[in-house]
Amino acid sequence: MSRVNTYDLFLKLSETITGFTRVDLLSTGLDVHYYEFINAKEPKTLKELLKKYYFVPCSDFSLDKSYFSEELNFLIKQIILLWYTGRWYINSVNYYYLSSESYKQGLIWKAINAHPFGANPTGYGSWGKSIYLEDINDK
């Protein structure tokens, strides 16, 4: 696995576990930051996870909890939550934001077709406009 680009493998894994495309992940501008952060925090666990992911064909890759150790399952959850919320979970309750940008770029906002509260101006009078589900489905 030494010849494999682990950053690229991290992005492929992130695509698989978040359901977002590589372009979506790259458009956050946080891909390298997240990879370097996780690699610094959990180098052995990340290496083990990427190794498991690398040696399993994508079509066979499963998020079945029995396939991974408890430690790897927790790291998978941490990575998913980091991409979606910008938060790094220390345990199941305690977390912190990596940066204000990680909050703003959380995939959750794209998933629910919304903007991060308090981060982006909505424009004067936007509260008076109605949004219907048909409008969302047309996009």
Image (tube, rainbow, N blue to C red):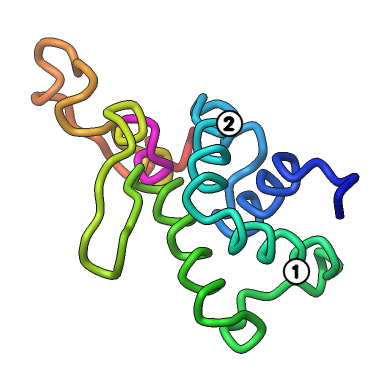
Which image quadrant: the N terminus? bottom right
The quarter of the displayed image where residue 77 is located:
bottom left
Dominant SS type (magenta): helix
Label 2 sits on residue: 32
Give SS at disc 1. Answer: helix
Task: Give whichever of discs 2 and 1 has the lower sequence position.
Answer: 2
Q: How many marks?
A: 2
Point out residue 131 in the picture as x, y percentages from the top left corner. 25, 35
- Residue appearing at x 46%, y 70% in the figure: 74
Residue density around tag 1, few if under 14, some if 14–19, many if 20 or more, within 10 Å = some
The quarter of the displayed image where residue 67 is located:
bottom right
Point out residue 127 in the picture as x, y percentages from the top left corner. 10, 25
- Residue appearing at x 58%, y 46% in the figure: 20
The quarter of the displayed image where residue 56 is located:
bottom right
51 sits to left or right of 11: right
* Residue type indicated by callout 2: Val
- Magenta segment range? 104-109
Q: Is residue 121 above or below residue 112?
A: above
* Residue type indicated by callout 1: Lys
117 sits to left or right of 34: left
Q: Which mark is residue 120?
A: none
Point out residue 81 in the picture as x, y percentages from the top left corner. 40, 55
Q: Which mark is residue 52?
A: 1
- Residue appearing at x 61%, y 60% in the figure: 44
- Residue appearing at x 51%, y 32% in the figure: 33
Give SS at disc 2. Answer: helix
Point out residue 111 in the picture as x, y percentages from the top left corner. 42, 46
Residue 79 or 47: which is nearer the viewer? Answer: 47
The alpha-carbon separation of the residues under discs 2 and 1 comes to 21 Å
Q: Is 133 in the magenta? A: no
